[in-house]
Amino acid sequence: MTQIVDRRLNGKNKSAVNRQKFLRRFRKQIKKSIENVIAERSVTDLDKGEKISIPRKDTNEPFFHHGKGGHREVVNPGNKEFQAGDKIPRPEGGAGQGNGSEASDSGEGTDDFVFELSREEFLQFFFEDLELPNLVKTKLSTITETKKVRAGHTSEGIPANINVVRSLTGAMGRRIALRSPYKKELKEKESELDTLLKRHNVTDQIIVDLQERINYLKRKIKNIPFIDTFDLRYDNRIEQPMPTTQAVMFCIMDVSGSMGREEKDISKRFFMLLYLFLTRTYEKIQVVFISHHTIASEVDEETFFYSRETGGTVVSSALKLMSKIISERYPTNDWNIYAAQASDGDNWHNDSSICKKILNEKIMPYVQYFAYIEITADRHQNLWEEYTGIKSDWDNFAMKRIEKIPDIYPVFRKLFQKRTT
Amino acid sequence: MTRKPISETSEWTFELIEEYHAEIERIAKNFGLSTYPVQLEIITTEQMMDAYSSVGMPVGYSHWTFGKEFVNTEKNYKRGQMGLAYEIVINSDPCIAYLMEENSMPMQALVIAHAAYGHNSFFKNNYLFTTWTSADSIIDYLLFAKEYILKCEQRHGEEAVEDILDSCHALKNFGVDRYKRPPSLSMQEEMSRQQEREEYLQSQINELWKTIPEKTADHHAADKKHYPSEPQENILYFIEKHAPLLEPWQREIVRIVRKISQYFYPQRQTQVMNEGWATFWHYTILNQLYDEGLCTDGFMLEFLQSHTNVVQQPGFDSPYYSGINPYALGFNMMTDIRRMCESPTDEDREWFPEIAGSNWLETMDFAMRNFKDESFIGQYLSPKVIRDFKLFSITDDDKHRQIEVSAIHNTPGYQSVRSTLSEQYNLGSIEPNIQVYDVDLKGDRSLTLRHTQFQRRPLDKSANEVLKHAARLWGFNVKLESIDDKGLLVKAYECKPSK
């Protein structure tokens, strides 16, 4: 007996296990490929899938088979001009001796094995082992707080929530709808009465009947209530869970004249990574972008990454602004605060000690983590020296240097490495 | 007599599939095809790619290599580099044929005729399949294998299992009994016997590797016998039974890979015949359907277009050439057998006196049942097909600087082309001949494999890699000797197991 089975619904993603196994096995090669990708890709298209290529020799599975050489006879189709006994020079690369699958197996040996990672898989590899440090501290508890948010209107509720406009609009609609049949009839009867009155020869009884009917209709119309309980509408509010962990990330970047094109590019990429990482890890997270030269200003993301400003460098201006924003908008008992600063280490020479002071007094006590990256291939500048002092005092302070674009990713990983405690 | 076509548009529905299937079944029965019951399964593209990458096993154990195949298939498919194989059919009872939901009605009908009747009847009747595979129990066994390997992963860790599987895969073509029939498989028996086997095997091994010297040791050393006394062709079998250090579950995995490889062995030997037979029947059945007025002209055009693509054979100098297309060769040979039966020429009477003018259904049925590619081509490749394909054979000898055209499609060449092509499908000469030759029982316990060269063909470089896998399974050194036809050692390989 024949059966027709619809299998379309079951066994979806059956190959997912095998795919994961494949990714796990070539994890090293894939990571390497991703690192190359980061180095070459432009920042804006970081957040999508990626074409990964790994050497095919790594993915090949060996098996015993014949190599080149020896004596062989091969039959091919499509002879045009050959006669038995013809001698032909041996074709390059063994073409013409192909026999089925064997030839194609060895034929593609040199290519890379190229495949696509989905966006999810890409980010998984990208952010593997990374975690924001010290998130545990403020309000990480699982208690879900809720707040009331508006959610349309309902027909039931308490008087305090009555929505007057909605209710009256409804009432008016109801009144119009209920009155209209009576009004229509009333109009007809009244005009009938008029014509009858003009003719004089009509019996009184008909007129009396008509007048009664008209009065009845008028009463009916009058009896339709101006507002009915049915019309009442109340504002609706529902409870929505509030995010329990709030984090704010300060991105501070030097856009001064001493930052060359390449340095800016590197710091942009570093923040891009950071931003991606944050938006991925936390559902509710705020990011504050502060760019500075001699004056600091809070900017939006677009300006932060793409603005072109020049000038001298006063790092403390940015730190002051950050401290001000913290005290105004992000009370430390409600917010986890993270900061990352990118600079070429160049600073107005008197300013570095001021930076140290601000950090020590106004910033470090309140932030969970402060990461500083110095982008320069030269020797360390004065800011680095001052910051080294801070590093020894605060263990939530980290600093690293990036010289070239390929360094970004390893440094990023190091700064945000999962802490095994 | 013409009847109303079953459908006018190319959309399919379950009802239409049933109707077409009923007609196809009727026609196939009229032609005398004997088949397993049919189970048609509608699947999605993704599921088809999945089935494709696990070599058509409906349930397979999980391993990265199937993931790799999937990733590769998916990539090629998305780029449009390949059409998906529109038919995958499982040699099982009932015979499972997959229909892809994206296909149009004519394609579904083609697949039903091709897979559910063509391949199905081949599976049921060809001697290799009836002797070597057990269609009624394969699904059970695959299920057992999948669960067993999953259990091993949980108990021993995914990596340990992966290592063993990798090594077994490297040797899977040498996990096949070529000459004796393996016992049939079934899940219940496997499970009940498995425990017993584990214990028994381990005791055997211990016996073999006993270190306490026997009293007669001197006597044995004197006439230094080989162990095994005869060379063994089934390397995986030998490893399963005799590898000193494998744990019972590892032996079971070796066994699973070996059994599955054995199951696919007939398929590897009957590609041309199997595809030729199935293609011949989808062509014949659908034409019959058309002659009876059950399908429209549009249906036929779509079918023919697809059919023509399948049986295309580019010439050796075409950029699309990748060897002889088994569909093309098989289809043409099958069609030619029918032609010789129905309208034989003088040439056919001379070459195939017993075929010319015989009953084509009986003659083809006989050919389908009793041959494999090698012998089928040797027996049935006619001069006409050789001419149609313009086949010619090349002698390529590394002792000469040039290659030579040894025979072409003319009277003196037919015999030679035919025997060369037949040899080309002989797995025995395609695959290197490597057998278990010796185990050093008294010394370092090393395993020696012997490669007997065929026409001076050397092994590919990858042999070293395969040896590493063999050494991992064996647990001690593994040697490989290449011997030429005069029995002289040409090349020796050795590999230590890495710890």
Image: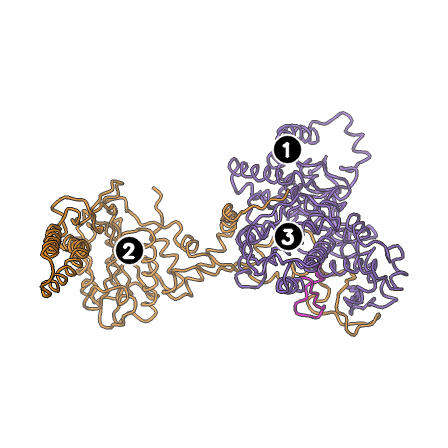
Q: Is residue B3 magenta?
A: no
Type of residue at label 3?
Ile
Please tell me which residue lies in front, A227 or A124: A227
Q: Are marks 2 and 3 on the same chain?
A: no
Q: Secondary structure at mark 3?
A: helix
x and y, in percent, of residue B444 in the image: 69, 38
Q: Give whichever of B47, A278 is nearer the camera.
A: B47
Amino acid type assigned to the residue bearing label 2 in the image: Ala
Q: Nearer the viewer, mark 3 or mark 1?
A: 3
Determine the main secondary structure of the stretch shown in magenta: loop
Q: Residues within 10 Å of mark 2 (few under 14, many from 20)?
A: some
In the image, which residues are magenta?
A: B310-326
- Residue beneath disc 3: B112
Is residue B262 found left or right of A34 in the rendered image?
right
Q: Quadrant of residue B146?
A: top right
Report the quarter where the N terminus of chain B lies: bottom right
CA gap, disc 1 and disc 2: 60 Å
Q: Tell me the quarter of the image containing the C terminus of chain B.
A: top right
The answer to whether dots 3 and 1 both sit on one chain is yes
Residue at 61% in and 60% down: A109
Residue assigned mark 2: A371
**Pointer 1 indicates a residue of which chain?**
B
Judge whether residue A358 can be spotted in this image. no
Q: Residues within 10 Å of mark 1 (few under 14, many from 20)?
A: some
Q: Residue at x 11, y 65 (%)?
A: A199
Q: CA distance from mark 3 to mark 1?
A: 33 Å
| Residue extending furthest toward the bottom | A81
Relative image position of residue B321 (x, y in whole percent): 68, 66
Quadrant in the picture for residue B124: top right
Disc number at residue B190?
A: 1
User: Could you say which chain is coloured purple in the image?
Assistant: B
